[in-house]
Image (cartoon, rainbow, N blue to C red):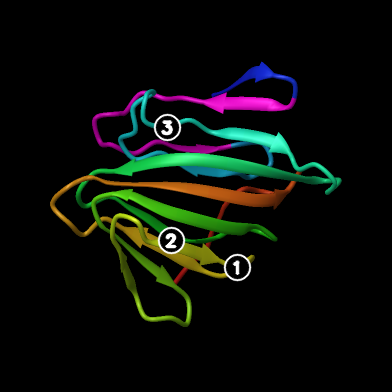
Amino acid sequence: MLTHVADGVRVHQSEPLQNNTVVVRGSAGVLLVDPGITGDEMACLAKDLAGEPGKEVNIQVYTFPPGASVPLHIHPDTHEFGYQLGGEFTLLINGEPSKILKVGDGFYVPPNVIHRGINASSTPAKFMVVRVRPKGKPALVEVQP
């Protein structure tokens, strides 16, 4: 659930479910995957991007427990930048060899590129993601292999 906290700013917080995965499909077809994240661990900030009408920036911090993954998906017309804060996380970007992200590593996923992530380690993986995206488009669209 997004809570309005200031003009143009929304925050999303959730409690983990027993299976460590929450999937929400919004009216615009948005799919949000929130694997085992507590309210204190994930904050989603969305704000209009100054000087870029129709675009917003979205910042999230994710913690993936061991074995958690995100299915193959794209972010329509969205630039995705990430920074590994803790643990290790395997990133698979279409057409590239898989990359194991370690603390301090960054990544970039271009718009509309199929990708997925897996925590194949035995410890939680934590990373920050910044997305620059068009307003009104789905944040994530799951794709079939």
Point 35% across, 56% down: residue: 104
Disc 3 marks which residue? 42
Horizontal and vertical percent for residue 118?
30, 59
Q: Is residue 32 magenta?
A: no
Where's the C terminus, which quadrant? bottom left
The residue furthest left is: 122
Please tell me the numbered disc located at residue 110.
1
Say above or below: 12 vs 53: above
SS class of the residue under badge 3? loop
Pointers 1 and 3 in contact (CB under 8 A)? Answer: no
Pointers 2 and 3 in contact (CB under 8 A)? Answer: no
Point 60% across, 44% down: residue: 30
| Amino acid of disc 1 | Pro
| Amino acid of disc 3 | Met
Category of crowding for the residue at label 1, using alpha-carbon neighbours closer than 10 angstroms: few (below 14), some (14–19), many (at least 20): some
Drawn side of residue 87 relative to residue 131, left or right: left
| Amino acid of disc 2 | Gly
Disc 2 marks which residue? 106
Examine the residues drawn in magenta and state their main secondary structure: loop
Mark 2 or mark 3, earlier in chain: 3
Label total for image: 3
Where's the N terminus, which quadrant? top right
Measure the alpha-carbon separation of dots 2 and 1.
14 Å
Quarter-of-image position of residue 36: top left
Quarter-of-image position of residue 99: bottom left
Point 83% across, 49% down: residue: 52
Q: Is residue 24 magenta?
A: yes
The segment highlighted magenta reads: 8-25
